[in-house]
Image (cartoon, rainbow, N blue to C red):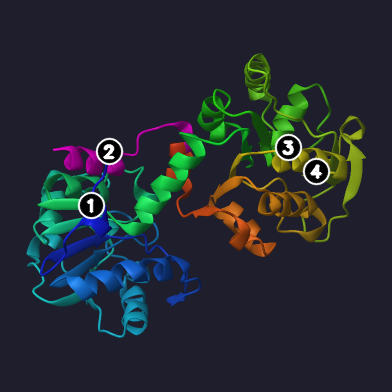
Amino acid sequence: MINTFNNIDLTGKRILIRQDLNVPLVDGKITSSKRIDASLPTLRRALDDAASVTIMSHLGRPVEGQVDAALCMQPIADYLSTALDIQVVLESSHPETLEPLGSGIRILENVRFWAGEKADDEKLARQYAALCDVFVMDAFGTTHRAQASTHGVALYANEVCAGPLLAAELSALACALKNPKRPLVAIVGGSKVSSKLSVLRSLVNVVDQLIVGGGIANTFIAAAGHPVGNSLYEEDLLDEARALTGLMKSRGATIPVPVDVVCGKELSASAEAVLKLVKGVQSDDMIFDIGPQSSAAFNNIVAAAGTIIWNGPIGVFEFPQFSRGTQDLAIAVANSAAFSIAGGGDTLAAVDQFGVIKDISYISTGGGAFLKFMEGKKLPAVAALEARSAA
């Protein structure tokens, strides 16, 4: 059991909040503020109750130990100042030189600018902990990383808790994976089996149906003995795909293989889309989507589900001629009575593009953390909160 933000008395305390404010920037301008907007309720409550609020986050992928002006937190500070109607000061000094904030709100510079962040350096973690009375971890998307600003600080702060976003995320994921309403259906798309192999290996032991899409599906199509032409697939993992299929079958579950596909000769916005049965795929064809027969079969599985977990699109949905499979699936998930949870950047882009994001039961904010949770792996930052809460 983890202490949560809503159960902590913040009155007059100095609060340090780790948030996920890693938003896209173009020429120093924020192009999507969704992550910042999601953090605002937490910050407003902290401002109402606490003596002072210090925020920390990462931004982009700078070389650790080097300050990169293009990834400075100033645009985030400016946005927060406007959104909260209070000046949010950017503190650009190294944490070792900082003092606890007496009042107001500030944001620390990009935590990845400081050497020791990725290594979960104890000295750096203690420097963060010294800035607060209460550390609030509210960045689910970073919980799979044992780093100074996510894990180490939670070991040394006087008091720790999970923020509202993190608590909601863990509750939704537990509902989907630890005590799901059956049938439990997992949808896993992506370019390569190898990138999600550990996820697939974990899921075949717990789900009732496993739908695969994208390049992953191509590998399963080839493993079933069908031609895939020039499609992206992994020949060295054909035996692995067969083994996973066999494991599912032994449990009375399935990994349905597409029976019809949409092909093109090249991956481009102008490529002609041609519908074919899988047995009719030619040597110069590239599979970019599933066909209507496969889509109908997948949609029937989704319609009968009790719980749905979705990570990864079914086809190249960015191009309209190869988007129908993902669109139909997104609508089927949205229309299902099942508890549904979708995670990963491409998945969220797809449900947003097809206008069904509000009809998904829960939208997960963390890509890597979402996958680790699906694998059944312990998330280091969550483990630290659990340990401190149990102490």
Give the mark, 3 or 1, whose residue is nearer the N terminus: 1
The secondary structure that most of the magenta stretch takes on is: helix
Q: Which mark is residue 295?
A: 4
Give the mark, 1 or 2, whose residue is nearer the N terminus: 1
Residue 102 in picture, x, y percent from top left: 8, 74
Amino acid type shown at disc 2: Ala
Q: Quadrant of residue 133?
A: bottom left
Is residue 62 visible in this depiction of the protein?
Answer: no
Q: Nearer the viewer, residue 68 or 239?
A: 239
Amino acid type shown at disc 3: Ile
Q: Nearer the viewer, residue 280 or 345?
A: 345
Q: CA distance from mark 4 to mark 1?
A: 43 Å
**Is 185 on the left or on the right of 5, as rendered?**
right
Q: Which mark is residue 301?
A: 3
Q: Residues within 10 Å of mark 3 (few under 14, many from 20)?
A: many
Q: CA distance from mark 3 to mark 4?
A: 10 Å
Name the residue beneath numbered marker 2: 383
- Does dot 3 land on a helix, a strand or a loop? helix
**Is 382 on the left or on the right of 127, as rendered?**
right
Residue 58 in picture, x, y percent from top left: 33, 60
Q: Residues within 10 Å of mark 4 (few under 14, many from 20)?
A: many
Give the mark, 2 or 3, whose residue is nearer the N terminus: 3
Q: Residue at x 80, y 34 (%)?
A: 258
Amino acid type shown at disc 1: Cys
Q: CA distance from mark 1 to mark 2?
A: 12 Å
Identify the magenta region: 374-391
Give the mark, 3 or 4, whose residue is nearer the N terminus: 4
